[in-house]
Amino acid sequence: MYYADAPHFTRGPPLRRPGVSPALAFAINGRFYAQPVTGVQRYAREIVSVLDGLLDDRAARVRLILPPAATTVPALSAIRTCHAEGASGHLWEQAILPLRTDAPLLNLCNTGPVSLRRQIVCMHDTNVFDAPGSYSPTFRALYRVLLPSLVKRGAMITSVSHFSAGQLAQRLGIAPRAITVMHNGHEHVYRWSAARSDLPARLDGIRPFVLLLGSRARHKNAAFILRQAAALDALGIDLVVAGGSAAIFSPTESVRASNIHGLGFVTDDDLAWLYAHALCLAFPSRSEGFGLPVLEAMALGCPVVASDQSCLPEICGAAALLAGPDDAPTWQAHFRNLVTSPALRADLRGRGLERAKAFSWHNAAQGYLALLRDI
């Protein structure tokens, strides 16, 4: 069981506030800049951005190494960007990247070059082991080889929640204390602007709505909420489904109903509008490493109804309504209570805003600097 104060406890070496010295030098695996932005890539981008602000641009010797497909180069001041040409994807990461790395390497998106020893790898979850049906056979097989291999080569492992760290320790045969928890943060939502979204025109006349961020990953359990469309309709509630899918996921069922509004891809500004106007975010996932949309919703004052599985009780604390991922009556009761009780909605908004303060990109980036000084 994880309690509301869980973010204040951290596995791994104690973190100290890093003073960046002239001797600090490392490289960052920039493969994620060639990938669509999901929660994992968001994590990496935000950590790099905050690291850049923490580093002394006169003293730091830090490189962000990018694959050829990364055509949009981030604007950084202290971190120098460079491309390593040749190959792409996992082949680039395993064969090209190690040849361009002469310092400790920071990998923020689950994998890294198996040939390197001096590196940090953030492994976000164990879903390829715990929810194998969500992924394509190729993706599943690759990750089941890469993750244990990185541990055997001595990589320093971080993860994004205590739940995920515990699962990784069990799956990879390492001590939980050897994994340092570096949570996601929430500050990026303050760069979003609901005023720039065109959704008010697209959703003109919509009733109170539950927001569901769609994904084809089976462990996300989106179909469970879609199947409740008729019950929501009877309560006068619409269902807005935002987001797309990815090739790594296995197909999942789809449901059609008159009160389901599918938006497909949405921008960050669209997300700001959706979080600001939704009755709640529904997050019924069976397996998560962190669950970034839950934190985003809380940071923007959107009530959350979430699964009581995996890391979600740890992240939500007492700031959300929880229910089993197959318990339709309880989910419907939560939706009914939210639509009929302004006081409940206000209470959850206040709890969520306070809870979000416990999770900071700034704190995570400082933690990475401390680890990089000791690697």
Image (cartoon, helix red, strand yellow):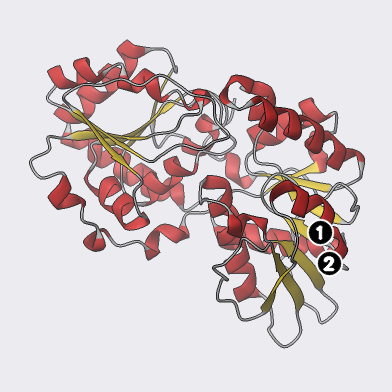
Instruction: Give the left or right position of residue 285, taking residue 92 as reference.
Output: left
Tell me if I can see residue 19 in this picture: no
Callout 1 touching callout 2 (CB < 8 Å): yes
Q: Residues within 10 Å of mark 1 (few under 14, many from 20)?
A: some
Q: Position of residue 252 (x, y in %)?
A: 45, 21
Q: Position of residue 183 (x, y in %)?
A: 60, 48
Q: Quadrant of residue 78?
A: bottom right
* Residue ranking furthest to the front: 86
Q: Is residue 319 above or below residue 99?
A: above
Q: Residues within 10 Å of mark 2 (few under 14, many from 20)?
A: some
Residue type indicated by callout 2: Arg
Distance from Cα at disc 1 to Cα at disc 2: 7 Å
Residue position marked by numbered label 2 in the rendering: 100
Question: Dividing the image into 4 quarters, which one contains the N terminus?
Answer: top right
Report helix, strand or loop for mark 2. helix
Label 1 or label 2, whichever lies nearer to me, is: 1
Q: Position of residue 295 (x, y in %)?
A: 45, 45
Residue position marked by numbered label 1 in the rendering: 96
Q: Nearer the viewer, residue 244 or 131?
A: 244
Instruction: Give the left or right position of residue 372, taking residue 353 as reference.
Output: right
Residue at 65 percent of width and 35 percent of height: 125
Residue at 37 percent of width and 55 percent of height: 268
Q: Position of residue 365 (x, y in %)?
A: 65, 62
Residue type indicated by callout 1: Ile
Report helix, strand or loop for mark 1. helix
Q: Is residue 140 above or below residue 56?
A: above
Q: Quadrant of residue 298?
A: top left
Q: Nearer the viewer, residue 95 or 237?
A: 95
Residue at 86 percent of width and 38 percent of height: 149
How many callouts does the rendering have? 2
Question: Dividing the image into 4 quarters, which one contains the C terminus?
Answer: bottom right
